[in-house]
Image (spheres, rainbow, N blue to C red):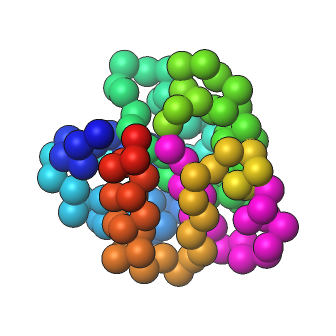
């Protein structure tokens, strides 16, 4: 898949963190960034008209957390191939293992380093 014109879904309840992640994603030429405030909002956006190429999600969010979102995306035939990166302050090893076991492709701890995020996304999209 081309890294240009990719559609990213950023699922994060903190406006500051969403802005920070979105800013990093603007390094991809023609990137479209769709934002969601929690897992329920993300599912609505995923069933919308835009094709999503990659999901970046927090774990701790109200209404529906990131782990539940990962689980539901992986159970959905139309969505299950979308790469997912979990970005969270939860550095606990069991959270990381659970996220990856549920089907996340990568796990990045906050504070995020833009260069690490860009490399992870590039690797995932290149493999898609």
- Look at the picture and state if 39 lies above or below 10: above
Q: Is residue 44 left or right of residue 101?
A: left
Q: Is residue 115 left or right of residue 111?
A: left
Q: In which quarter of the view is residue 38 placed?
A: top right
Q: Please state the horizontal and vertical placement of residue 18, each as a whole percent of the image.
A: 45, 60
How many labels sit on residues? Answer: 0
In this view, the residue farthest toward the front is 127
- Of residues 36 and 126, the one drawn nearer to the viewer in this rendering: 126
In this view, the residue farthest toward the right is 94
- Of residues 19 and 75, the one drawn nearer to the viewer in this rendering: 75
Asked whether residue 89 is in view, the answer is yes
Asked whether residue 65 is in view, the answer is no
Q: Is residue 2 left or right of residue 75?
A: left
Residue 89 colored in magenta in the image: yes
Which quadrant does the C terminus fall into? top left
- Look at the picture and state if 89 lies above or below 98: below
Residue stretch rendered in magenta on the structure:
83-98
Q: In which quarter of the view is residue 103 placed?
A: top right
- Of residues 81 and 29, the one drawn nearer to the viewer in this rendering: 81
Q: Please state the horizontal and vertical placement of residue 34, each as a whole percent of the image.
A: 38, 42
Residue drawn at point x = 79 percent, y = 73 percent: 93
Residue drawn at point x = 48 percent, y = 76 percent: 112
Q: Please state the horizontal and vertical placement of residue 121, each as a whole percent of the image.
A: 39, 58
Which quadrant does the N terminus fall into? top left
Q: Please state the horizontal and vertical placement of residue 31, each as a whole percent of the image.
A: 23, 47
Residue 12 colored in magenta in the image: no
- Of residues 124 and 107, the one drawn nearer to the viewer in this rendering: 124
Residue drawn at point x = 72 percent, y = 72 percent: 90
Residue drawn at point x = 78 percent, y = 62 percent: 97
Q: Is residue 12 left or right of residue 93?
A: left
């Amino acid at each position: 898949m081309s890294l240009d014109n990719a559609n990213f879904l950023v699922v994060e309840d903190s406006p500051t963190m969403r802005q920070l992640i979105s800013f990093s994603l603007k390094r991809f030429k023609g990137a479209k960034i769709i934002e969601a405030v929690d897992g329920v909002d993300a599912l609505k956006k995923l069933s919308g008209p835009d094709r999503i190429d990659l999901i970046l999600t927090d774990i701790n969010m109200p209404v529906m957390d990131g782990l539940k979102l990962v689980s539901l995306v992986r159970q959905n035939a139309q969505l299950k191939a979308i790469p997912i990166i979990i970005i969270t302050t939860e550095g606990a090893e069991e959270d990381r293992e659970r996220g990856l076991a549920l089907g996340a492709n990568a796990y990045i701890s906050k504070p995020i380093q833009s260069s690490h995020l860009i490399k992870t996304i590039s690797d995932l999209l290149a493999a898609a």
